[in-house]
Amino acid sequence: MNKESVIKKLQENIKIIYHRAVDADKQLEQLRQQKKAGFAQIFTNDSAFKNHSTTFLPYVEELAADLQAIQTDNSEHYKTLIPAIVVKIELLFKTLKAFKDNLKGE
């Protein structure tokens, strides 16, 4: 798979995550208004993310910045950065799914 194909696939995944994150953040806001969401951050300090937030969008923004960095990297160095991006994508997909599943269970 060439660099352009990899980047396109990553972009597609980030777009899906973005839409799910927007929906999840709206639901989080409703839970906060009902005093049902009292946590300091979504991911722990030892997660793959540098950001720490009580909403999903800052994590998506970090992921988009990572993708932007590999797009502008003209060398083969981008191949070493892809695993970290994939880990973040997987973590966001899993966490967003768990959040949605937990809301259905209420």
Image (cartoon, helix red, strand yellow):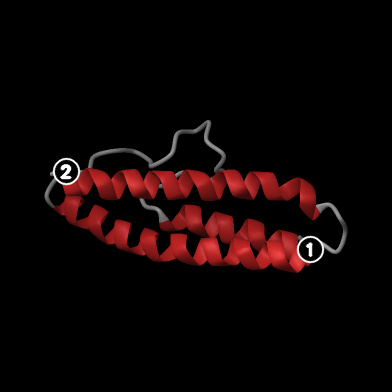
Res. 64 image quadrant: bottom right
Question: In what element is the residue under mark 2?
Answer: helix
* Residue in the image at 23% along x and 43% along y: 102
Judging depth in this view, the residue of 65 and 94 nearest the camera is: 94
Q: Residue furthest top?
A: 46
- Could you say which is closer to the camera, residue 55 or residue 91? 91
Q: Please say if 52 is above or below 7.
A: above
In the picture, the quarter occupied by the N terminus is bottom right
Q: Tag 2: Cα neighbours inside 10 Å, few (<14), some, or many (≥20)?
A: few
Q: Position of residue 87 (x, y in %)?
A: 58, 43
Residue assigned mark 1: 2
Which residue does the image show at 53% across and 61% down from the upper left? 13
> Toward which corner of the image does residue 30 lie, by quadrant?
bottom left
Query: Which numbered dot is residue 94?
Result: none
Q: Quadrant of the C terminus?
A: top left
* Residue shown at the point (59%, 66%) measured from the top left: 11
Q: Residue at x 11, y 50 (%)?
A: 34
User: Residue at label 2?
Assistant: 105
